[in-house]
Image (cartoon, grey):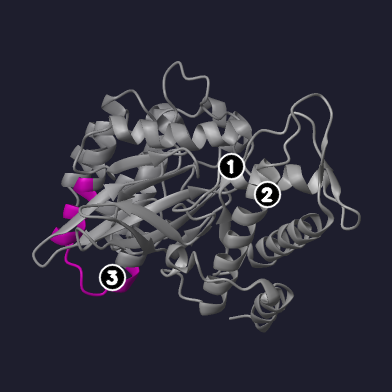
């Protein structure tokens, strides 16, 4: 761990050490870092005590009421140390969240607290709910799981990051099974968050063994749970390229085609086809392939379909740069899928200088510069793929 992170934690611990209290330590016993356990328990005790005192002094009219000097200074210290620690740990493995309700109260109090001579409580300040059995702080890399017989926390491990979301892996202690959590980045704007949730909703509507299954969306953190897969298609092919038979490669390609045939049957276009967005699950006797990442999906009559996304990735049709992403159609999807299938067959992405005539004819039809000369449907693409040898 970064020495600066350790130093910051120790600095906060020392700043509040005279107030140290372990009454609420059980709420934070799942946290691995013992100093953070102690800090959170102490801050929790202080906020509960000081907000209880403030509730006794709440103004009853349009005018503020006086909050004594000592509690005012103490609460100001707790707020500043809390926010300072939150900022310092934000991008680290010890990042934590402050309960939304308490964060709102903390920021409101910060606006009127004085470090000397007491403070005037803001007019119309509502009575504050005190948390006796609810943690005020939660680690960002934990997910709360409700299972029988009790609610537990499971550790999250980052397995992917992107411009819109982070992807974590965790093990459900009740089911003894791995799952994936996809969490929207905090800097997304309102429209981007709507698209993030739309991705979940769209995937929830799909019901195919070749599409990643999603389970539950959590509004508070803008995150959702989905099934766990072992690796990306890219990683699987590169790891096994020297030992895969043509039959095994065609089995993988056929699953991909079935997934996209189903997607197109729902009048959808994926628009983000790459070997990183197709996932693989390895069983003892079978390899299962599923399509994921529906963040750029094009749905009919949807006002949320993105038309200004960047055209990026080797697998996308280069003509999209001039035609525009809003004009993406089946011909562009066929182009990307043809490249994907060639990658599955050979482990290569460069389609120049193909010596296998069967493969060369297949590729030239799927990537034809004149779109009307490409395969018209996934079914037609699949029929040609079956005949490769």
Contact check, label 3 and label 1, Cβ < 8 Å: no
Question: Which residue is the extreme one toward the right?
Answer: 117
Q: Which residue is mark 1?
A: 101
Q: Which residue is mark 3?
A: 241
| Residue 258 on the magenta segment | no
Q: Quadrant of residue 123?
A: top right
Q: Residues within 10 Å of mark 2 (few under 14, many from 20)?
A: some
Magenta residues, dominant SS class: helix
In three-dimensional space, the C-alpha distance between marks 3 and 1, rounded to whole angstroms, equals: 52 Å
Q: Which residue is mark 2?
A: 53
Which residues make up the magenta segment? 238-255
On the image, the x and y values in percent for residue 102 come to 61, 47
Instruction: Choose between 9 and 324: the one closer to the eye.
Output: 9
Q: In the rendered view of the protein, which quadrant contains the N terminus?
A: bottom right
Q: Quadrant of residue 100?
A: top right
On the image, the x and y values in percent for residue 29 come to 43, 70
Query: Residue shown at 83%/44% (left/top)?
Result: 112
In three-dimensional space, the C-alpha distance between marks 1 and 2, rounded to whole angstroms, equals: 18 Å
């Amino acid at each position: 761990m970064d020495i600066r992170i350790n130093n910051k934690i120790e600095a906060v611990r020392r700043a509040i050490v005279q107030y140290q209290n372990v009454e609420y330590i059980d709420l934070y016993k799942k946290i691995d870092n013992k100093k953070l356990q102690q800090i959170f328990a102490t801050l929790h005790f202080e906020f509960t005590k000081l907000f209880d005192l403030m509730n006794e002094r709440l103004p009853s009219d349009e005018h503020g009421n006086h909050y004594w000097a000592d509690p005012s200074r103490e609460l100001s210290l707790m707020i500043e140390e809390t926010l300072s620690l939150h900022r310092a740990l934000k991008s680290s493995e010890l990042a934590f969240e402050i309960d939304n309700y308490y964060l709102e109260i903390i920021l409101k109090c910060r606006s009127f607290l004085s470090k000397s001579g007491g403070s005037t409580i803001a007019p119309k300040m509502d009575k504050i709910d005190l948390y006796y059995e609810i943690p005020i702080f939660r680690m960002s890399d934990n997910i709360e799981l409700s299972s029988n017989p009790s609610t537990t926390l499971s550790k999250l491990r980052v397995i992917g990051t992107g411009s819109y979301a982070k992807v974590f892996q965790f093990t459900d202690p009740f089911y003894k099974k791995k799952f994936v959590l996809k969490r929207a980045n905090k800097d997304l704007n309102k429209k981007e968050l709507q698209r993030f949730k739309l991705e979940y909703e769209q995937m929830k509507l799909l019901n195919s063994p070749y599409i990643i299954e999603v389970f539950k969306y959590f509004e508070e953190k803008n995150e959702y749970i989905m099934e766990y897969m072992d690796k990306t298609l890219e990683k699987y092919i590169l790891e096994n390229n020297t030992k895969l038979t043509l039959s095994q490669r065609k089995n993988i390609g056929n699953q991909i085609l079935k997934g996209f045939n189903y997607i197109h049957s729902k009048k959808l276009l994926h628009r983000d086809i790459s070997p990183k967005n197709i996932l693989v699950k390895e069983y003892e006797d079978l390899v299962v392939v599923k399509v994921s990442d529906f963040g750029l999906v094009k749905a009919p009559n949807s006002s949320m379909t993105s038309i200004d996304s960047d055209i990026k990735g080797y697998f996308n049709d280069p003509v999209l740069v001039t035609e525009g992403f809003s004009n993406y159609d089946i011909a562009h999807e066929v182009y990307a899928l043809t490249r994907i299938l060639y990658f599955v067959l050979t482990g290569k992405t460069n389609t120049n200088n193909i010596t296998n005539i069967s493969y060369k004819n297949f590729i030239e039809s799927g990537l034809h510069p004149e779109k009307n000369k490409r395969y018209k449907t996934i079914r037609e693409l699949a029929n040609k793929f079956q005949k490769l040898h």
